[in-house]
């Protein structure tokens, strides 16, 4: 039987291998979320964890496995999904032919279902059909490199394009050169110009083009790692440097005759959101400690499928880089504290998980507390919970003197017995 490696590492392959979004790498497991003693409601509302495992509900995914994100519903396996790292057990039953690390391989095991996930759609009856998964999609790539030593004479180089592509070079929309991956031109008397390289591709749906404009500079999100903008301390803005957004200073936006102004953003947040390559950005989460979001309720639905109270909470609470207005469509159960007077009330929760903490003994709440007994002199009609401060007035300095004669005697007991059983 074919021995397969352990489950986790290979499930986190890139989308280029045909894996669904729930198997992508990232900070999927947070051990601090694990709580074996947590009481989860026994309801079957399956979710697919970012670790590729299906759980009966979101509470179990978080408290028992430490999963940080999931999608509602069972895990869905797609055709041509690579099954490297999936352990189907030590049985000899032939399951079929599937892709393992990009190679069509006959797999055996105990069942097509592993950790609640049905992998049967990824299997084929014969190798030729499986091999069709390895067909390469049409190449539509093209990158344009720009260099200049004096700011007047420029060299342009096209890279990462299909070998059979017929390149055309244009200056300000006019054809300047046909063919060749290198184009040179001088612009000493024209401060504003543009150079474009392009090729026609039927599979790509038309012209594939990359341009450089000296007026606008490089394209937004161009990585400035290795670009020397001088030793001046002038703040130029925020730009991507070696993959992360950073504040950049220098003597100007020109370096080696190339205008890098287009790569800069006014704010840290705009750089992160514009240049985001994933739904959740670690830089936004790191900034959360320095940002105090308001409690304004203007719900948005994050790209992670989670509803947030407002855009600030989405960015810095969830680290999401895109969202749509309004809450997410209800497609599953959200566990949390649903009691508004609790300190840890969660307005996004639709099923209480028993985690509520109530003032004044379990926590200190910003919600007003006071005396909630109307008969008390210090009754507070605005109080949302009783904080034990009620003060009651007695008819005399001697509380047991019911008839007010200044002493507690048999007559007081008779007066009490006389009232016993009365309906008020």
Image (spheres, rainbow, N blue to C red):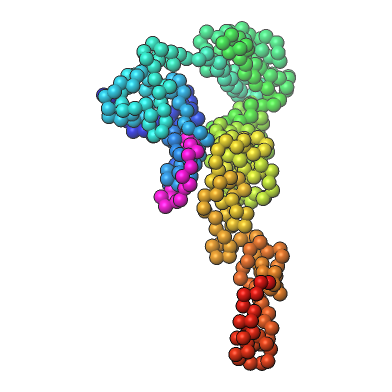
* Residue under the point 40% across and 15% down: 130
| In the depicted structure, whether residue 152 falls above or below residue 9 | above
Residue 90, quarter of picture: top left
Q: Which is more toward the observer, 148 or 330?
A: 330
| In the depicted structure, whether residue 394 falls above or below residue 333 | below
Task: Locate the C terminus and report the quarter of the image it occupies.
Answer: bottom right
Residue 394, quarter of picture: bottom right
Q: Which is more toward the observer, 200 or 64?
A: 64
Residue 198 lies, in percent from the top left, at 62, 13
Residue 261 relative to residue 50: left or right: right
Residue 228 lies, in percent from the top left, at 58, 33
Residue 46 belongs to magenta span: yes
Task: Locate the N terminus and report the quarter of the image it occupies.
Answer: top left
* Residue under the point 69% across and 83% down: 395
Res. 11 in view: yes
Res. 286 in view: no
Magenta stretch: give its range: 33-50
Residue 174 belongs to magenta span: no
Q: Main secondary structure of the magenta part?
A: loop
Residue 146, quarter of picture: top right
| In the depicted structure, whether residue 418 falls above or below residue 215 | below
* Residue under the point 68% across and 36% down: 325
Residue 144 relative to residue 64: left or right: right
Residue 269 lies, in percent from the top left, at 63, 40
């Amino acid at each position: 039987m074919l021995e397969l490696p352990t489950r986790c590492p290979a499930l986190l392959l890139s989308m280029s291998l045909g894996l669904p979004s729930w198997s992508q790498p990232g900070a999927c497991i947070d051990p601090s979320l694990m709580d074996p003693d947590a009481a989860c409601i026994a309801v079957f509302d399956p979710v697919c964890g970012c670790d590729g495992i299906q759980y009966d509900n979101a509470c179990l995914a978080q408290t028992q496995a430490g999963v940080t994100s999931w999608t509602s519903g069972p895990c869905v396996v797609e055709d041509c999904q690579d099954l490297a790292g999936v352990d189907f057990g030590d049985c000899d039953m032939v399951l079929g032919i599937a892709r393992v690390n990009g190679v069509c391989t006959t797999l055996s095991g105990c069942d097509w279902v592993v950790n609640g996930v049905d992998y049967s759609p990824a299997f084929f009856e014969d190798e030729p059909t499986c091999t069709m998964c390895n067909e390469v999609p049409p190449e539509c790539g093209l990158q344009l490199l720009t260099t200049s030593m004096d700011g007047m004479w420029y060299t342009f180089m096209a890279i990462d394009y299909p070998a059979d592509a017929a390149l055309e070079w244009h200056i300000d929309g006019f054809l300047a050169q046909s063919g060749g991956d290198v184009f040179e031109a001088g612009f000493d008397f024209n401060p504003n110009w543009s150079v474009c390289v392009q090729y026609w591709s039927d599979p790509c749906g038309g012209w594939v083009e990359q341009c450089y404009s000296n007026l606008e500079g490089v394209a937004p999100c161009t990585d400035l790692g290795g670009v020397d903008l001088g030793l001046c301390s002038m703040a130029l803005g925020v730009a991507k440097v070696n993959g992360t957004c950073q504040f950049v200073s220098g003597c100007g936006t020109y370096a080696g005759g190339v205008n890098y102004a287009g790569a800069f953003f006014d704010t840290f947040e705009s750089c992160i959101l514009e240049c985001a390559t994933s739904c959740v950005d670690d830089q936004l989460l790191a900034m959360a400690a320095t940002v105090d979001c308001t409690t304004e309720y203007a719900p948005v639905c994050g790209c992670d499928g989670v509803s947030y109270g407002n855009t600030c909470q989405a960015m810095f609470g969830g680290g999401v880089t895109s969202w749509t207005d309004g809450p997410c469509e209800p497609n599953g159960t959200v566990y949390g504290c649903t009691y508004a007077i609790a300190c840890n009330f969660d307005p996004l929760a639709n099923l209480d998980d028993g985690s509520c903490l109530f003032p004044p003994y379990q926590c200190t709440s910003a919600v007003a507390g006071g005396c909630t007994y109307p008969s008390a002199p210090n009754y507070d009609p605005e109080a949302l919970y009783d904080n034990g401060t009620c003060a009651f007035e007695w008819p005399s300095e001697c509380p047991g003197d019911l008839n007010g004669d200044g002493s507690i005697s048999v007559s007081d007991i008779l007066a009490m017995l006389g009232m016993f059983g009365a309906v008020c």
